[in-house]
Image (spheres, rainbow, N blue to C red):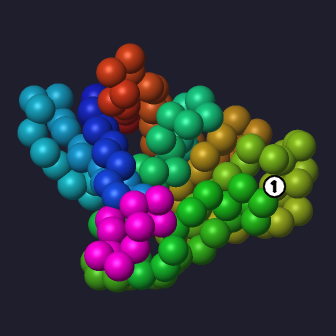
Amino acid sequence: MSIYTIKVKSQKSKVESQKAEDSESKQSLLLLNERGEKVSPLEILKECAPRRVFAFDGQMGAGKTTFIKALCEAMGTNDVVNSPTFAIVNVYDVEQPYKGEVYHFDCYRLKDIREAMDFGAEEYLYSGNYCFIEWPDMIDALLPEDTVRVKITAEENGDRRMAVE
């Protein structure tokens, strides 16, 4: 098991002509390994290769979507990465060396495993492409045996602890 620390900072960007209340808020993510060294989110993919299905567990607001967004951006997507809460699955195109599609699931609203089977979850999960799954409990029985389990917990100081196994 590997342990990482995620530091998320909100940054406000302002265009000179805009008022402060109209500023756009962005989040930047800093990922630190167990030695406190800054690492790219891509390190997780390298560490877990050749596995490609990642199940993210954590409470609401723990940072699952924020980390998946940073991971997809590091993989070279130009798509807008957000939680597929109502769509259940979003598809993002990524660049080299990860060229192809990444599937981002949010299973929070699924009522039962049959719903996942109805939209073809197994086809995504066994496609050979990267799959990042939030709230995986509902589809646990469908996940490949070698699924990477990622647990994100909020620390009292606002940082996040991420355990990868």
**Left or right of residue 140, residue 59 in this image:** left
Q: Position of residue 1 (x, y in %)?
A: 32, 28
- Tag 1 residue: 116
Q: Where is residue 139 in the image (x, y as percent from the top left)?
A: 73, 44
| Residue 111 is a magenta residue | no
> Is 18 in front, or is 111?
18
Q: Where is residue 8 in the image (x, y as percent from the top left)?
A: 33, 43
Quadrant of the image occupied by residue 33: top left
**Left or right of residue 145, residue 164 in this image:** left
Q: Where is residue 100 in the image (x, y as percent from the top left)?
A: 45, 81
Quadrant of the image occupied by residue 72: bottom left
Residue at screen point 61% across, 46% down:
134
Instruction: Name the amino acid, label 1.
Output: Ala
> Is 71 in front, or is 23?
23
Residue at screen point 24% across, 46% down:
30
| Residue 18 is a magenta residue | yes
- Say if residue 63 shows up in the picture: yes
Q: How many labels does the image show?
A: 1
Majority secondary structure of magenta residues: loop
**With respect to residue 117, does 154 lie above or below?**
above
Secondary structure, mark 1, is helix
Residue segment shown in magenta: 13-23
